[in-house]
């Protein structure tokens, strides 16, 4: 008969007794092994090796939380059934989360080849086919303190499918009750730097294993290949930002440069333009350098607005991003960005920003500089992280060729990945930008469904990009 060995973290008898009782209700459970949460955390490779050594059943269940787990009726039987039918190396499921005593649905998303984010959320119940688990752990050569579960997941995905069961099979207690906008910057918090270094190492090895790793070899960018009236354009897509758009535009117009530049503001949305007064604010700004574009189409999103700006006859050689909520940190930002293109000979430049509230008061984690980006490995690590930084700037001929997807989320990330496949991306570690967080930010407080949709889209973008890189490497290998 199919059996399961279950591994759960232990902090106290009171903490585990309800979880153990829930597991014992299934006839499939062979043994329940507790692991000291302090001495043997799941994030350590040595802990996973202990699990592999003790796993002597068909399946191995790892529970990753230290709060109470309550399995649904015949939940383990269902997980095993799906695993057997699909031949999965690992299965995971939708579940219920208790937050403040209230039960809420917590659907998760399908795993893709491009689901390389180390914070991809499977839920807390992971059921592995033991043979796949043992094979993956045997292949783990690095002893991680923080990245072991991530490393395990990547290596298991090389052995077989990670299958999502879109059924609510268990309940858990959710302790992180922050809004989505408050979680966005966890991965760039300097306090998590050691964690990120390990995650990058694990991801890089995975890319090498599957043929998706790109070596740090880049072609030279020729900036004189086309003629432009303007050296640079600040590009601001906007929809209904009457409270902040004037600040953004005036910040751009205030730049001091030794070259000619303009500011291109493109409205977008289902009515072709804003309807909260933003359009009127823009029309009231009397400066010949401001190019105000109101599309005639009603299907233009943020990405489409970028394409319109890039293909506008007044677009400069370099297109530099400024969100309609935000402002540049001083009058020298544009000059620094353009100088970086020439100094680093790159097709895209990304700066650093300070996270603030609407009144420019600093918010945690403060400065976000994406120090994890290195010239040698940045474009590989870009497949793991969820954003590349800001402000972003593009060599216009390259950006025109790549094009932005016409969406309102992830469009900049998609273009950054595509550019990094073929070109070096330059970095500026000075704060060039104030990213102003407020309740009207589009990602301030998302429902779980919307957050899942966003994450699914970015994972799809990663999948396409990873597949393109694997194909590129295969062609290069074939030519040798």
Image: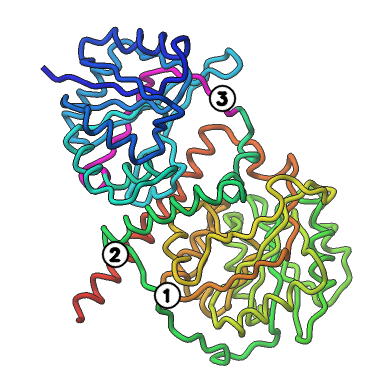
Name the element at disc 2: helix
Residue at which label 2 appears: 470
What residue appears at the point 34 percent right and 34 percent down from the top-left corner?
A: 47
Dot 2 or dot 1, earlier in sequence: 1
Report the side of 161 relative to 417 (left or right).
left
Numbered label attached to residue 422: 1
Q: How many marks?
A: 3
Q: Which quarter of the rendering shows the C terminus?
A: bottom left
What residue appears at the point 59 percent right and 75 percent down from the top-left corner?
A: 311
- Was residue 169 drawn as part of the magenta stretch in this picture? yes
Using the image as rendered, state which of residue 414 and residue 403 is in the foreground: 414
- Was residue 79 drawn as part of the magenta stretch in this picture? no
Dot 3 or dot 2, earlier in sequence: 3
Residues packed near mark 3 inside 10 Å, few (<14), some (14 to 19) or many (20 plus): few
Using the image as rendered, state which of residue 37 and residue 19 is in the foreground: 37
What residue appears at the point 67 percent right and 51 percent down from the top-left corner?
A: 271
Residue at which label 3 appears: 175
The Cα atoms of the two marked residues, 2 and 1, are separated by 13 Å
> Which region of the structure is painted magenta?
156-176
Residue 310 in the image: x percent, y percent? 60, 73
Report the side of 339 relative to 300 (left or right).
right
Residue 36 in the image: x percent, y percent? 40, 24
Q: Which of the two marks, 1 or 3, is nearer to us in this view?
A: 3
Name the element at disc 3: loop
The Cα atoms of the two marked residues, 1 and 3, are separated by 42 Å
Dot 1 or dot 3, earlier in sequence: 3
Residue 1 in the image: x percent, y percent? 10, 17
Numbered label attached to residue 462: none
Q: How is this picture coloured?
A: rainbow
């Amino acid at each position: 008969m199919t059996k399961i060995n279950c591994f759960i973290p232990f902090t106290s008898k009171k903490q585990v007794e309800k979880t153990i009782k829930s597991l014992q209700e299934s006839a499939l459970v062979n043994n329940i092994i507790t692991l000291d949460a302090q001495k043997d955390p799941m994030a350590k490779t040595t802990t996973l090796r202990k699990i592999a050594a003790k796993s002597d059943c068909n399946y191995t269940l790892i529970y990753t939380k230290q709060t109470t787990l309550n399995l649904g009726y015949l939940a383990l039987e269902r997980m095993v059934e799906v695993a057997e039918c699909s031949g999965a190396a690992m299965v995971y499921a939708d579940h219920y989360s208790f937050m403040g005593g209230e039960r809420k649905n917590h659907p998760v998303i399908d795993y893709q080849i491009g689901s390389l984010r180390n914070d991809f959320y499977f839920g807390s119940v992971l059921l592995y086919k033991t043979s796949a688990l043992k094979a993956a752990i045997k292949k783990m050569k690095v002893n991680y303190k923080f990245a072991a579960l991530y490393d395990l997941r990547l290596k298991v995905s090389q052995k077989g499918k990670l299958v999502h069961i879109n059924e609510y099979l268990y309940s858990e207690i959710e302790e992180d009750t922050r809004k989505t906008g408050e979680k966005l910057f966890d991965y760039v918090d300097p306090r998590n730097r050691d964690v990120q270094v390990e995650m990058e190492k694990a991801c890089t090895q995975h890319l090498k294993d599957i043929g998706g790793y790109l070596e740090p070899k880049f072609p030279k960018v020729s900036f004189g290949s086309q003629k432009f009236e303007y050296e640079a354009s600040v590009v601001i897509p906007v929809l209904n930002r009457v409270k902040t758009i004037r600040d953004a535009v005036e910040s751009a117009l205030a730049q001091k440069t030794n070259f000619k530049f303009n500011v291109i503001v493109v409205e977008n949305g289902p009515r072709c333009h804003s309807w909260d007064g933003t359009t009127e604010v823009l029309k009231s700004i009397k400066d010949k350098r401001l190019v105000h574009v109101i599309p005639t189409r009603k299907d233009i999103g943020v990405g489409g607005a970028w394409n319109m700006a890039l293909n506008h006859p007044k677009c400069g050689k370099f297109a530099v991003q400024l969100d309609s909520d935000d402002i540049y940190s001083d009058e020298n930002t544009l000059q620094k960005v353009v100088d970086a293109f020439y100094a680093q000979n790159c097709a895209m430049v990304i700066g650093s920003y300070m996270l603030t509230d609407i009144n420019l008061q600093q918010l945690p984690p403060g400065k976000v500089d994406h120090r994890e980006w290195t010239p040698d490995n940045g474009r590989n690590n870009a497949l793991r992280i969820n954003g590349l930084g800001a402000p972003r700037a593009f060599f216009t001929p390259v950006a025109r060729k790549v094009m932005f997807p016409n969406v309102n989320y992830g469009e900049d990330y998609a273009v950054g990945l595509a550019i990094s496949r073929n070109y070096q991306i330059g970095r500026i570690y000075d704060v060039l930008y104030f990213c102003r967080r407020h309740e009207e930010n589009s990602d301030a407080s998302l429902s779980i469904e919307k957050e899942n949709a966003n994450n699914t889209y970015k994972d799809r973008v990663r999948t396409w990009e990873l597949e393109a890189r694997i194909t590129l490497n295969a062609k290069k290998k074939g030519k040798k």
